[in-house]
Amino acid sequence: MGYAHTVDAMVYRFAGLRELLAKASPARSGDMLAGLGAASAAERVAAQMALADLPLRVFLDDAVIPYEDDEVTRLIVDSHDGAAFAAIAHLTVGGFRDWLLTRAAADDHGALSAIAAGVTPEMAAAVSKIMRNQDLILVASRCRVTTAFRNTIGLPGRMSTRLQPNHPTDDARGIGASILDGLMYGSGDACIGINPALDSVGRLVTLLHMLDELIDRFAIPTQSCVLTHVTNTIAAIERGAPVDLVFQSIAGTEAANRSFGLNLALLREAQAAAQSLGRGTVGQNLMYFETGQGSALSSQTHHGVDQQTVEARAYAVARAFQPLLVNSVVGFIGPEYLYDGKQIIRAGLEDHFCAKLLGLPMGVDVCYTNHAEADQDDMDNLLTLLAAAGCTFIMGVAGSDDIMLNYQSTSFHDALYVRRLFGKQPAPEFADWLRKMGIFDDGMRLGAMPPLLAQAAARLQS
């Protein structure tokens, strides 16, 4: 099926849904690198106008990657909830955008939650392509997605942080110092999550025991995670390690996930293994997924689909596992895929919007690599916009500079900034612990270091 639209007497033709979606995307370096992006602003506008007129039902009949070729497509099609879709089945993509912006489409009335299972990733990607940044922010801010393990993530008026105490040699004292620093600024309610420098099962087990002992000793209502490959996590569980969250990077095509060494069956195995431990106290959402625009393109597994649509398809994978946390590491891959601050900001807002619309507890690693045309002011802008949009969680990295992964992210101070600006608090169980420990006062202002943490800090210095 082909599509066409006329702009200034020029007829622009698009061979099919894949090309229409790609040409309608806001400009980004990855799509241009792949030869998928619009050749001009006029072609992009024509594609967006043609896309706006497209009925949502078309996405149920025209798969961007064939059903028989891709297990992610099969997951999307087989899990689609027709009853949830019925409320929006009569709409075009443009009509869907208009409805999302109405007062009726807010989770105060349950409308967005009610349709989430009926929205496919391609529908979400399509409508995002014809929305301004302010549209993405407004609609995402109305989505309510709540998950729980040892605390409750995503409640209104809350914004969580992953405390990311990475160290280039996995030194226990260095990791411990970063954890104490983050806790003193109220970071860590989403999880305390380490990217290990040495990705071995033995190192994983050591780090998991260290985190478990720390959380238990100070009775911190949070969850730990060591961000290793899912097969390592399964092996660690078999060794009796105290695994809270199962982590995995995922993508939006079967081939891209295969390049990561995984498939849906392996994710189900890992989920079942972690569930058997029964470590949650207030809930059992225990999967943690990371995504990012450009991952499928970088491995040449995108099937000619634009990077933002492929990214949205990754959210279908995440949604199938009822995760506690999902986040886009938006600027991590580099300028080959998101060239500058403007493209990173747009991508971050798109990712957050699409995931929330699909019913996911979405956070964003507000980040960039040092060879991108971006700086910390760009990240301040994206951080502020995401906080306005109701972002579920962000990263907390000492000094905003991850010295193991070598990229720039957000700091403990950045989390304080957005919480103060928007009047947001950490997860309720974690906020209560901060007040009980004297780290925050009743007004959520910083207090003094509690004696127990002061003793721990002294031991780290000795």
Image (cartoon, rainbow, N blue to C red):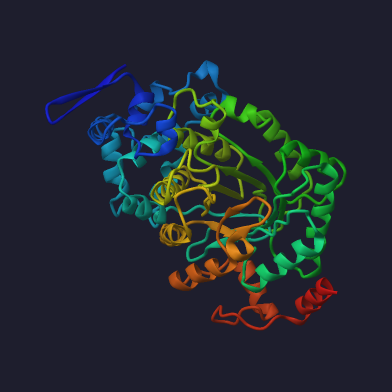
* Residue found 71% across the figure and 58% down from its top: 281
* Side of 42 where 293 appears, left or right: right
Q: Nearer the viewer, residue 456 or 138?
A: 456
Q: Nearer the viewer, residue 213 or 269?
A: 213
Q: Nearer the viewer, residue 360 or 44?
A: 44
Residue 57: give x, y in percent of width and height: 34, 27
* Side of 9 where 143 appears, left or right: right
Q: Which residue lies furthest to the left in this view?
A: 9
* Side of 331 where 193 appears, left or right: right
In the displayed structure, would residue 230 be above or below residue 50?
below
* Residue found 41% across the figure and 59% down from its top: 385
Q: Is residue 120 in view?
A: no
In the displayed structure, would residue 144 be above or below residue 95?
below
Quadrant in the rendering for residue 82: top left
Q: How many marks?
A: 0
Q: Quadrant of the N terminus?
A: top left
Residue 169: give x, y in percent of width and height: 78, 53
Q: Quadrant of the C terminus?
A: bottom right
Q: Which residue lies furthest to the front in this view?
A: 371
* Residue found 48% across the figure and 73% down from its top: 420
Quadrant in the rendering for residue 247: top right
Residue 160: give x, y in percent of width and height: 57, 61
Residue 159: give x, y in percent of width and height: 53, 63
* Residue found 61% across the figure and 44% down from its top: 289
Quadrant in the rendering for residue 258: top right
Q: Is residue 301 in view?
A: yes
